[in-house]
């Protein structure tokens, strides 16, 4: 794999283009709010702090979906939605882009050993969509609902996106 030097804007455009191309051309899904969400998710999760942003009451990052779900259940209103959305994002990220890592994430010595990440992701997005919010109208809920309802398709699409960016051209090199 070649190293590409890129700023955040360039990387964001690459993710947006790869997601849009994959979902519209390969999967026949023309849903700009959904593809924008997925591109933004990829951009956010470039930083490992964002992947492990949920924390326990002592400030330690939660690395297992089981612990994240317990934390989400303890929260109220908007923080609850954020926690459930993060669980959906976390499971979509690993299941769609790095399915080989699931064996380690769900290792026999881990709380997630028997967890079905796709099922948890689907349910978490649907729970997030159903969480009440103070502001009206709720513009996030429809996208979160579609993510839950189409979780497997989104995983599949992200797998294709990963193949697209697998060997990007070097800076200044023709694609």
Image (cartoon, helix red, strand yellow):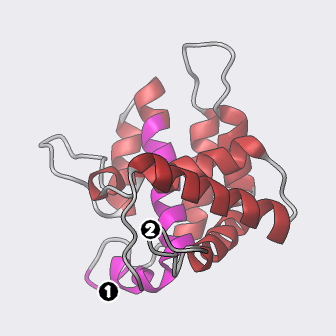
Q: Based on the displayed image, in which of its 4 quarters is residue 22 positioned?
A: bottom right
Which is more toward the observer, 48 or 17? 17
Q: Residue at x 21, y 46 (%)?
A: 56
Local packing at callout 2 (Cα closer than 10 Å; few below 14, some 14-19, many 20+) is few
Q: From mark 2 to mark 1, how far is it between C-alphas?
A: 43 Å
Residue 116 seen anywhere in this rendered image of the structure: no
What x and y, as percent, mark residue 96? 57, 71
Q: Residues within 10 Å of mark 1 (few under 14, many from 20)?
A: few
The image shows residue 105 at horizontal and vertical percentages of 35, 77
Tell me the quarter of the image containing the C terminus: bottom right
Residue 171, label in figure? 2
| Residue placed most toward the observer, 24 or 97 | 24
Using the image as rendered, state which of residue 22 and residue 90 is in the foreground: 22
Would you name the residue on which mark 1 appears? 108
| Residue 63: mark | none
- Relative placement, left or right, of 78 versus 163 is left
Q: Any magenta on residue 132?
A: no
Screen quadrant of the N terminus = bottom left
- Asked which secondary structure carries label 2, the reply is loop
In the image as oriented, which residue stretches furthest toward the left?
Answer: 58
Q: Is residue 112 above or below residue 54?
A: below
Residue 65 against residue 131 in the figure, above or below: below
Instruction: Give the mark nearest the N terminus, 2 or 1.
Output: 1
Asked if one can make out residue 42 in the rendered structure from this viewpoint, the answer is yes
Q: Is residue 95 left or right of residue 157?
A: left
Which-is-in-front pick, marks 2 and 1? Answer: 2
Q: Is residue 96 in the magenta section?
A: yes
Residues drawn in magenta = 82-109
């Amino acid at each position: 794999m070649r190293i590409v030097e890129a700023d955040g804007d360039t990387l964001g455009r690459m993710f947006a283009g790869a997601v849009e191309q994959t979902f519209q051309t390969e999967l026949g899904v023309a849903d700009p709010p959904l593809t924008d969400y997925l591109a933004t998710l990829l951009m956010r999760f470039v930083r490992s702090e964002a992947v492990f942003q949920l924390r326990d009451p002592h400030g330690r990052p939660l690395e297992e979906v089981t612990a994240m779900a317990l934390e989400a259940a303890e929260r109220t209103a908007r923080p609850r939605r954020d926690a459930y959305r993060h669980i959906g994002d976390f499971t979509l990220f690993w299941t769609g882009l790095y399915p080989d890592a699931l064996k380690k994430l769900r290792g026999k010595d881990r709380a997630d050993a028997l967890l079905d990440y796709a099922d948890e992701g689907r349910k978490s997005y649907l729970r997030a969509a159903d969480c009440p919010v103070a502001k009206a109208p709720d513009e996030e809920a429809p996208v979160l609902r579609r993510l839950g309802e189409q979780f497997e398709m989104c995983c599949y699409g992200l797998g294709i996106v990963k193949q697209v960016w697998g060997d990007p051209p070097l800076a200044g090199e023709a694609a």
